[in-house]
Image: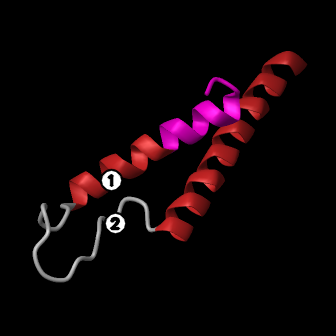
Amino acid sequence: MDATNEQRDKGRNTDEVALELMKFIATSTGYGKGTQAVGFSGKGARTPEEQAESLLELYRKCRGVVEGGA
């Protein structure tokens, strides 16, 4: 039973660390918000769905790094 609890705690800790890493990167770089450009730019404003997809992709990358696979 201890092995099951240990695996669950390890998984939760990995997710928590990946989430904290994602939040740090997103807040310090503005990742997922898109660019705020004055004048003409190649793309229009990003939709909320595009922003969410960007953040989910960042989380996947952070989780890979935390798990040691990246």
On residue 27, which mark appears? none
The residue where tag 2 is placed is 33
Q: Position of residue 20 (x, y in %)?
A: 64, 55
The residue where tag 1 is placed is 52
Sequence order check: which comes first, mark 2 or mark 1? Answer: 2
Callout 2 secondary element: loop
Q: Position of residue 25 (x, y in %)?
A: 56, 59
Most common SS among magenta residues: helix
Quarter of the image with the C terminus in it: top right
Q: CA distance from mark 2 to mark 1?
A: 9 Å
> Which residue is pictured at 43% across the width and 61% down the height?
31
In screen coordinates, is 1 left or right of 37? Answer: right
In screen coordinates, is 70 left or right of 34? Answer: right
Q: Position of residue 8 (x, y in %)?
A: 73, 28
Q: Residue furthest bottom?
A: 38
In screen coordinates, is 49 left or right of 7? Answer: left
Image vertical order of residue 30 relative to residue 59, above or below:
below
The answer to whether any part of residue 1 appears in the image is: no
Neighbourhood count class around disc 2 (C-alpha, 10 Å): few under 14, some 14–19, many 20 upward:
some
State which region is magenta.
59-70
